[in-house]
Amino acid sequence: MKYCDILRKIKLLKKNCFSFSLGKSLLGEDICCFHLGSFKGKQILVEGGIHAREYISTLFLLKEIDFLSNKNLDGGMYIVPMMNPDGVRLVLDGANFIKDENLKKFLIMVNGKEDFSLWKANANAVDLNVNYDVFWGQGSQNLKKLSSANFIGYYPNSEIENINFINFAKKIKFNGSLSFHSKGEVIYYGFKMNGERLKKEKFIVNQLTKLNGYTAVKTKKSTGGLSDYLSYFYHVPAFTIELGSDFCVHPINEIFLSQIFDKNKEVLTTFLNLV
Ligand SMILES: [Zn+2]
């Protein structure tokens, strides 16, 4: 699979589904958002592809958009299938598409090789999912130096992809959020949470794990994530779902997509009904 194959899928879906751009990535790619269902009633905010090598989450969400596009929803869903288009392109196409020779050399230097298949970051070598301004830099795996993964950036909310998303989240009303990653078949919940809110999250996560058979795990050691940010500042149920078995290797091959889809295709609608 190449990056253009993902763009082709997005283009096809745009014919039947309402979509718009949240803004551009560092290298000028649109961060596309689809909206399904009605703008009235409850809304959920769903995203994937923030970690480049986990682009199976993008493929899952594109398949899900197609699956839900002609269904009646009780409310609506904003779905951003590919938060980190530059990173996904690096994983799928390598660095040769980059016209700026200095940037290309910089990325190959940070990566340590020309094979980008395990790259997680954006085209600034910042891991977008540890860059949000929510207990920034306090995660157990955080790195404070440039890397293909886990570098928190020089300051919180520094990356254009995250800034675009934050500005968008401010403009809409939403009742809950799902962030799709890979891998491990786990749903993380309860970021910095206790009391009634934690009870509600536990109830929802138990319903979701009944659908997909994944394991519910309370978030403890991660900080600076998109899901953490939305949970902490918007006080909505927000879960991180790790698609695919741990037996798969990164990046998860698309041959596993139908299996992942079958387990998770009802998760979004169930979540919308529960929030
Ligand atoms: Zn991830």
Image: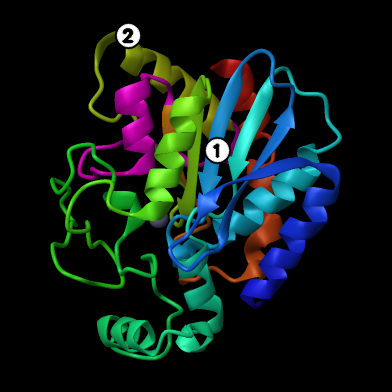
- Mark 1, residues whose alpha carbon is within 10 Å: few (<14), some, or many (≥20)? many
Q: Which mark is residue 156?
A: none
Residue tagged by mark 1? 46
Q: Inspect this view and state whether residue 260 appears.
A: no
Q: Amino acid at mark 1?
A: Val
Q: Earlier in the sequence, mark 1 or mark 2?
A: 1
Q: Amino acid at mark 2?
A: Glu
Can you say which quadrant of the picture contains the N terminus?
bottom right
Is residue 38 placed above or below 128 in the rendered structure?
above
In front: mark 1 or mark 2? 1
The CA span between labels 1 and 2 is: 24 Å
Q: Inspect this view and state whether residue 10 appears.
A: yes
Q: Which residues are magenta?
A: 211-237
Q: Is residue 16 left or right of residue 136?
A: right
Residue at 53% across, 84% down: 97
Give percent across and percent down for residue 174: 52, 22
Element at label 2: helix
Q: Is residue 242 left or right of residue 190?
A: right
Residue at 24% across, 72% down: 147
Give percent across and percent down for residue 233: 31, 24
Q: Foreground residue, 90 or 216?
A: 90
Q: What colour scheme does the image use? A: rainbow
Q: Is residue 43 left or right of residue 160?
A: right
Element at label 1: strand
Residue tagged by mark 2? 196
Disc 1 to disc 2: CB gap under 8 Å: no
